[in-house]
Amino acid sequence: MSDLFDGAIMTIFARELLEATVIIGQYRTVLFRSDDWQDPARQKEGLRAITVSALLAALVALIVTVCVAVPLAVLSRELDDRVVEIIEGISKLVAAVCILQLSLKIPKFLGVYASKKGEDGATIGLSLKSIRFNVAWNIWRELAEIGVFLIPFFLGGEAIAVPLSGLAGIAVGGLLGGIIYFANKLLKNKFWLAAFMAILLLMLSTGLFVGGCHEFEEVLGETEKVYNIGVVADPGSEDAEEHEEEEEEEEEEEEVVVVTYTGWSEKKLPMAIFKPFGYSAGPTQLMTAAFWIWLAFGIILHAWKYISSKKIRDAEESANAEKDGVKTLEHEETSNMDDNDLLKEEISTDGDNSYNEFLKTVESN
């Protein structure tokens, strides 16, 4: 089963599909909210254009990915094990970057982080032609990225894991997209949902980064373990190494070192649940450093996004306040002008009445 499924491949599919889903949702939202698209027939035509453009773009991206995957999968048969491990390390690092980007984008999708492009990310008042082009181009770009990110897996001989992992990723991406869609419609306060999803994805990204670094470590030589609470008898201990050297010198049959895993081992439940998030019962120095460096990097990026969002919203509030102030001033000036006109009219009326009374008095005399 492990050969047919790969978590890193699943995350790549999930990330790109989620972004594609959000893009489609944004353009559909524009059609539902824009006054220019309230005509039922025109709105139906616009929604159909979004669906058809997205499907055609996805089909083209799939064909291109398959055309790239086949020759790369054939070439991968000539690679030795060390190269394969290096490629696996690269693939995990690529997946770590993808998941970290998704962790940063989820709060923006939910409206917690502000965006300079606006909340919808699409321009209201789009024509039917521009909708077809923008949707097709963006969906093609997102789904074609899957093929680019899968190149290390094709070279590493893991193409067999793409179908099942891809389907799982599509399901996860669709689920997350649905959560975001309904959260935007139903929830008033989306902060905690965004925080939970962002933290979960950040930890998953950290686990992939640690795993990728460890793949390079296995090829180039492992650093010392910081601690090891996962096994009762560590096959990498000095006693085990001396035993192996004696066996080689005496040219005897190699004995199998029996390893008993403790309850803290990532190879047994319940701790196996935390392995995708960077947990290890026997981390090396490189793994420990990679974990904390990548986690700190992700936290710094989120802090920067939060501060930037606060500045953007403050600037928007100031601009709106300035606009409201201008409108209030214009309203006051208009009101004053109306009052002055009314006063002039009253004075004119009073003057006319006085003059008429004067004429009547003169005539009577």
Image (cartoon, rainbow, N blue to C red):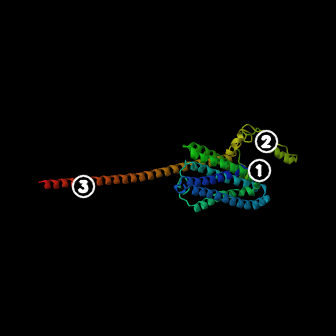
Q: Amino acid at mark 2?
A: Asp
Q: Nearer the viewer, residue 76 or 327?
A: 327
Q: Which residue position holds label 1?
A: 4
Give the image location of residue 311, x and y in percent: 49, 51
Q: Earlier in the sequence, mark 3 or mark 1?
A: 1
Give the image location of residue 167, x and y in percent: 72, 51
Give the image location of residue 258, x and y in percent: 81, 40
Q: Amino acid at mark 1?
A: Leu
Nearer to us: label 3 or label 1 = 3
Q: Quadrant of the C terminus?
A: bottom left
Q: Secondary structure at mark 2?
A: helix
Q: Which mark is residue 348?
A: 3
From this viewpoint, is residue 42 visible?
Answer: yes
Q: Is residue 74 left or right of residue 105?
A: right
Q: Amino acid at mark 3?
A: Ser
Give the image location of residue 39, x and y in percent: 55, 56
Q: Secondary structure at mark 1?
A: loop
Tag 2 near tag 1, CB within 8 Å: no
From this viewpoint, is residue 210 visible?
Answer: no
**At 79% from the left edge and 42% from the top edge, which residue is drawn?**
239
Nearer to us: label 3 or label 2 = 3
Q: Dot 1, crowdedness within 10 Å: few (<14), some or many (≥20)? A: few
**At 62% from the left edge and 51% from the top edge, which residue is drawn?**
102
Give the CA distance from mark 3 to mark 2.
114 Å
Q: Nearer the viewer, residue 211 or 23?
A: 23
Q: Is residue 318 left or right of residue 284?
A: left
Q: Which mark is residue 239?
A: 2
Q: Quadrant of residue 269?
A: top right
Give the CA distance from mark 2 to mark 1.
37 Å
